[in-house]
Image (spheres, rainbow, N blue to C red):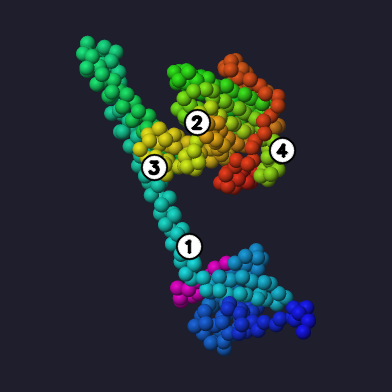
Amino acid sequence: MDIREILSKKRIIDIDTCLPDGVIFVASDGKISWTNTKAPLFFQLSKKELLSFKINDLLENGLELIKKAALEHKALVSKVKGQEKYLEMTANSVSDGYVVDLRDSTQNYKTVTSMMVEQESSKKINRDKNNFLLKLSNELKSPLHSIVGFSQALLDGLGGAISDKQEKYVKIINKNSCELLFLLEKLFELSSSELGITDKEPKVINAISIINSTVKLNEQLYKEKNLSINITVDENVPRLMRTSEKTYKLLIQNMIETLIRMTDIGVIKISAMPPSPEFLELHNINPDNDYIVLSFVNSGAGLPDNEAETIFEPYAVVEKSNKKHLLRSIAMASVKNMVKLLHGVIWTESEVISGTTFNILFPTGISRSEVLTVKEDNEYSSDLNEEVTNEQPEMTVNAEPEEVQEAQLTETAKEELENIGKVQA
């Protein structure tokens, strides 16, 4: 026998008895005019009884959901009236009605619903926890401010002479209270960022100028470690952004402060550049809008794979006993939350011994025509058009834009990048 003849034969399936799903035909007015053997079992009816009903008599919003399922070509779930049963339905539109496929999805629906309820409950608990911490922030910080202030006063001799042994103890009190105060500040920043607290009305800011002023603010901190910070700005990068000034400043402060703490020797490099057209096309980002890519690079030891995976997750720090790692993860978690609030995305590139790079892409939120208008507005001329080269002698302007590396993007970063264009649109 010719195998080709066998394979070429049409296979006829009896949908009345062979299909595991229920199949019904629903007329345009909702009347059920045909059913296979399986469908009546979902409703605990006989075939004859089922054919006497309209679909809305049996399913909540039955006909509306069937029309939507047929129009959108996707499966929808409806509850059986009078039962704790849920049916998943797909539908195809025909000339005088709909062919509907029914499948019992009660267990799946209850599982998903339970997971969603638990997730929402977890979110509520987290919101309540963050609100609780922020409300207590002053009560927690005020005693520590007093301890720091009075211990420093004792060290400065304002309370009279103290012995060498007393001075040693007071220095320990001062140091530990300062570290605890810093930790609390970072925790409160994380709580605030998780709640999404930001300026109600965004304003136009000079993104590059804020970076330079923040570097100056941390000058003593990085010079104490004999570090240097170099800033490179591409000549084509947009400098103006419409965003939350408070959130952006805090984000940049956390980035610079964290890099200083991560770096023991060498140079910290900060660069600002526009994303390449290939990068925008690859991630389906609208090229008609302007974007800024900020890269923060340190020359430290780099992050091992296990640390790189939890750099933005303070609740999953690998070495829980390591305070340095905990503080870093708290600060970087705040940074990631703030980047999200500003409709941006952050991703890392790290190699052991070669250092760590943090890349952040921001939409400017301002059209090119608005940039020209703002520059002509005298209200902004003293701030937004300020030449940042006067603020930071170590900054250089690079005429050749650097390429944003695609290979290092995480799956999460890729998904967030795909949403950037949607936000801008």
Q: Identify which amino acid the numbered label 2 is placed on.
A: Ala
Q: Is residue 253 visible?
A: no
- Image: magenta residue range: 76-86
Whichever of callouts 1 and 4 sits on the residue coming sooner in the sequence is 1
Alpha-carbon distance for marks 1 and 2?
43 Å
Q: With respect to residue 206, does 100 lie above or below?
A: below
Whichever of callouts 2 and 4 sits on the residue coming sooner in the sequence is 4
Alpha-carbon distance for marks 1 and 4?
40 Å
Residue name at image x 61 percent, y 70 percent? 90
Rendered image: mark on residue 277:
4
| Residue that label 2 marks | 301
Alpha-carbon distance for marks 2 and 4?
32 Å
Give the mark count.
4
Alpha-carbon distance for marks 4 and 3?
40 Å
Q: Are marks 1 and 3 in contact (CB under 8 Å)?
A: no
Q: Identify which amino acid the numbered label 3 is placed on.
A: Asn
Q: With respect to residue 420, does 392 lie above or below?
A: above
Q: With respect to residue 346, does 141 lie above or below?
A: above
Alpha-carbon distance for marks 3 and 2?
34 Å
Q: Residues within 10 Å of mark 3 (few under 14, many from 20)?
A: many
| Residue that label 3 marks | 130
